[in-house]
Image: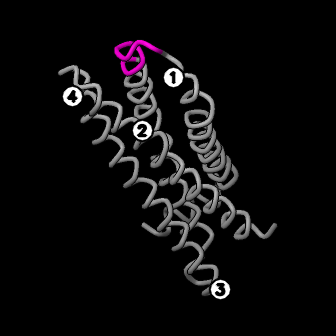
Amino acid sequence: MRDFFIHMFNDYGRIVVFLHIISACLLIGSMFVLRFVIQPVEVDIEDSKLKFGSCLKMMKRYIIFLLPVMLVIALTSVFMNLGLGFKNGNPATYVMIHTKEALWTFIAFNFVYMYFKYLKAKKGFETENYIEVEENMILMVRYLIPMNLVSALISVYFGVILRGY
């Protein structure tokens, strides 16, 4: 199986790296836009039902957007890790690879947690319990997304170091 990844990376390495970088940019950009552009506008909406309804629709679309982006990041990272042979290289580099993997695992689990918070907020919206909706939305937008944003930026920085720039 390792030979397959090495062979594929040798043939399509630029495409793999391109997809990896584009997916990371989409993920980081979407978190930034969600937290610092859309959320402040949503706060200004007076009608609770309209505000929380639009927030829930936005989060549903965001979660659907995240699935393929995270899958591409994970798949291309496997191709790069095996294709570039980091395991047989410098031990410090391999440690940095594992640190990046740990950061992205944290990000993935954080997004899974956000999904469960979304489901809880949706249930609160259906029962018109707007306090529960607000608490879950605040947790997602003010805390979980910024944590993922910082983790992703650190991981990107490590990626730049790994590329040798």
Read off the magenta span: 46-53
Dot 1: element: helix
Instruction: Say if residue 63 shows up in the picture.
Output: yes
Q: Amino acid at mark 4?
A: Lys
Of the residues shown, which amino acid type is indicated by label 1? Glu
**The C terminus, quarter of image:** bottom right
Labels 1 and 2: the sequence-earlier one: 1
Cβ atoms at labels 1 and 4 below 8 Å apart: no
- Residue 102, position as x, y percentages in the image: 47, 68
Disc nearer the start of the sequence (1/4): 1
Q: Which residue is mark 3?
A: 90
Q: Quadrant of residue 127?
A: top left
Front position among marks 3 and 2? 2
Q: Amino acid at mark 3?
A: Asn
- Residue 87: percent from the left, percent from the top? 55, 80
Asked if disc 1 and disc 3 are in contact, CB closer than 8 Å, the reply is no
Sequence-first disc among 1 and 3: 1
Which comes before the other along the chain, label 2 or label 4? 4
Q: Nearer the viewer, residue 83 or 49?
A: 49
Q: Secondary structure at mark 4?
A: helix
Could you tell me which residue is drawn at 45 percent across and 48 percent down?
144
Position of residue 110 measured from the top left corner of the image (x, y, whole percent): 40, 52
Q: CA distance from mark 1 to mark 4?
A: 20 Å
Q: Secondary structure at mark 3?
A: loop
Q: How many marks?
A: 4
Decide if residue 53 is on the left or right side of residue 89.
left
Going by the numbered disc 2, the residue's amino acid type is Ile
Q: Is residue 61 above or below residue 53?
A: below
- The numbered mark at residue 42 is 1
**Quadrant of residue 140 in the image?**
top left
Residue pointed to by mark 2: 138
* Residue tagged 4: 123
